[in-house]
């Protein structure tokens, strides 16, 4: 499996509040993560960095994950633990009061992938030549779409588009969405922050990933495309290519 990670400040923001990476456990299984610190709160970069580093440390000490049940249990247990640590940190440090982050994670094995998320960072997959969004945004606008109050088209330009209903670290109790997919026909998994998904369409994602180019070129092109369309937010992605055996990693 080839992997690529890239995080970019974008063209407007003074700081990058995104974080993430690709990490390996003791059985050399892959975990990808993207965390988008909440831009409307202080210390969003602290929240996303803490979440990423804590998950990385727990994953490195984890033995082989052999079943979807094990993967789902691991994600629920450790994301809940990280939430408690972030929440406690914000209470003990005035400069971090109210901090939070989105989180999307995938555990990848040879037989299945398990995805957990909270907030509006996303997971897309490509299989059989089609791209599919497999997470659902925990946002006010998405809830308005789900309830039929506004259309998907209206949602794209809604003034409260960035309002989240769930995030990591803002409350001691959280609800995490977790799902497992088989990877029989899977080609790509892409995790990204909304700095990318708000700018680049599913069709554009598929078009870039189908090009006959190295994974680094594809991932960099997607980030560049989001910047070409304005780059008002930080832009982060993790790209995993299942149609390969050797691993390549990218930087920030």
Image: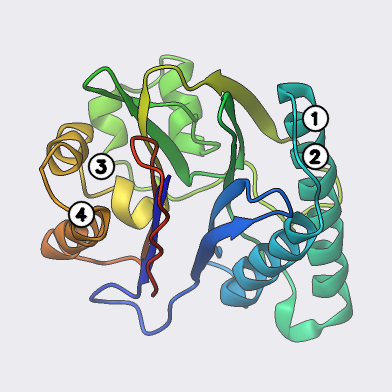
Asked where in the image residue 76 lies, by quadrant, the reply is: top right
Question: Which mark is nearer the camera, 3 or 1?
Answer: 1
- Image quadrant in which the C terminus is located: bottom left
Residue located beneath label 4 in the image: 214
| Crowding near the residue tagged with mark 1, few <14, some 14–19, many ≥20 C-alpha atoms within 10 Å | few
Return the x and y of residue 222 as percentages of the image width and height. Answer: 21, 54
- Residues under labels 3 and 2: Cα distance? 37 Å
Left or right: where 244 falls relative to 228: right
Residue located beneath label 3 in the image: 157
Q: Which coloring applies here? A: rainbow
Mark 2, secondary structure of its residue: helix
Left or right: where 48 falls relative to 175: left
Whether residue 61 is visible: yes
| Crowding near the residue tagged with mark 4, few <14, some 14–19, many ≥20 C-alpha atoms within 10 Å | few
Residue located beneath label 2 in the image: 74
Asked where in the image residue 73 lies, by quadrant, the reply is: top right
Question: Which mark is nearer the camera, 3 or 2?
Answer: 2
Residue located beneath label 1 in the image: 70
């Amino acid at each position: 499996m080839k992997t690529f990670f890239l995080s970019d400040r974008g063209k407007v923001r003074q700081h990058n509040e995104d974080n993430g990476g690709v990490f390996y456990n003791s059985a050399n299984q892959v975990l990808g993560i993207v965390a988008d610190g909440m831009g409307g709160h202080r210390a969003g970069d602290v929240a996303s960095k803490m979440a990423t580093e804590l998950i990385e440390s727990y994953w490195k000490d984890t033995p082989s994950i052999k079943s979807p049940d094990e993967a789902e249990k691991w994600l629920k247990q450790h994301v809940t633990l990280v939430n408690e640590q972030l929440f406690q940190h914000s209470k003990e440090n005035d400069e971090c009061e109210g901090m939070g982050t989105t989180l999307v994670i995938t555990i990848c094995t040879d037989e299945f992938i398990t995805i957990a998320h909270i907030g509006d960072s996303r997971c897309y997959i490509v299989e059989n030549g089609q791209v599919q969004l497999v997470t659902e945004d925990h946002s006010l606008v998405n809830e308005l779409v789900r309830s039929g109050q506004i259309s998907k088209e209206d949602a794209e330009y809604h003034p409260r588009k960035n309002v989240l209903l769930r995030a990591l670290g803002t409350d001691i109790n959280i609800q995490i969405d977790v799902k497992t997919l088989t990877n029989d026909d899977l080609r790509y998994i892409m995790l990204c922050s909304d700095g990318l998904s708000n700018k680049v369409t599913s069709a554009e994602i598929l078009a870039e990933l189908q090009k006959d180019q190295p994974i680094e070129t594809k991932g960099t092109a997607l980030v560049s495309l989001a910047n070409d369309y304005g780059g008002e937010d930080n832009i982060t992605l993790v790209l995993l290519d299942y149609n390969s055996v050797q691993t390549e990693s990218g930087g920030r």
